[in-house]
Amino acid sequence: MARWPDVPDVYGWLSLSVQGQWRIHPEGRAWSQSDTDLAGLSTTDLAGEAITNTQFIEFIDRNYAVDAAGRWYFQNGPQRVYARLDA
């Protein structure tokens, strides 16, 4: 990790559904809350797209953790990808 010390964390691109399915949000709007953020987005956009690649799902599951503030993320190399939890 010291090799890439300034990699920013990622927010808004990943969620975990009530059914336990990982979902990707190509627009980066997993945490959009204002009407301005949501304007023009369909229900499908807000729900994200199901991640179906089993190898990628296993990678996320292996590297899924919680930080000291109680936020859930998966460690992607030097980068933390924070997830919206729907349940």
Image (spheres, helix red, strand yellow):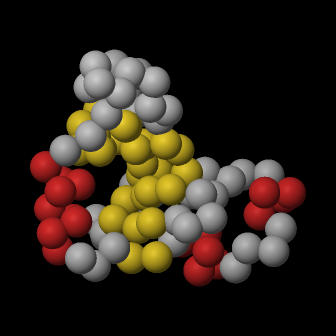
> In the image, is 21 to the left or to the right of 56?
right
Relative vertical location of residue 72 with respect to residue 67 in this rendering, above or below: below
Q: Is residue 32 visible?
A: yes
Q: Residue at x 34, y 73 (%)?
A: 51
Report the residue that reaches farthest toward the front: 3
Q: Position of residue 42 (x, y in %)?
A: 70, 79
> In the image, is 34 to the left or to the right of 59?
right
> In the image, is 31 to the left or to the right of 8?
right
> In the image, is 86 to the left or to the right of 25?
left
Instruction: Report the quarter where the C terminus lies.
Output: bottom left
Q: Position of residue 61 (x, y in %)?
A: 18, 54
Relative vertical location of residue 78 with respect to residue 58 in this rendering, above or below: above
Q: Residue at x 84, y 58 (%)?
A: 35
Q: Residue at x 13, y 49 (%)?
A: 62
Relative vertical location of residue 27 with respect to residue 78 in this rendering, above or below: below
Q: Quadrant of residue 77?
A: top left
Q: Quadrant of residue 5?
A: top left
Q: Position of residue 63 (x, y in %)?
A: 19, 44
Q: Position of residue 65 (x, y in %)?
A: 24, 37
Instruction: Report the quarter where the N terminus lies.
Output: top left
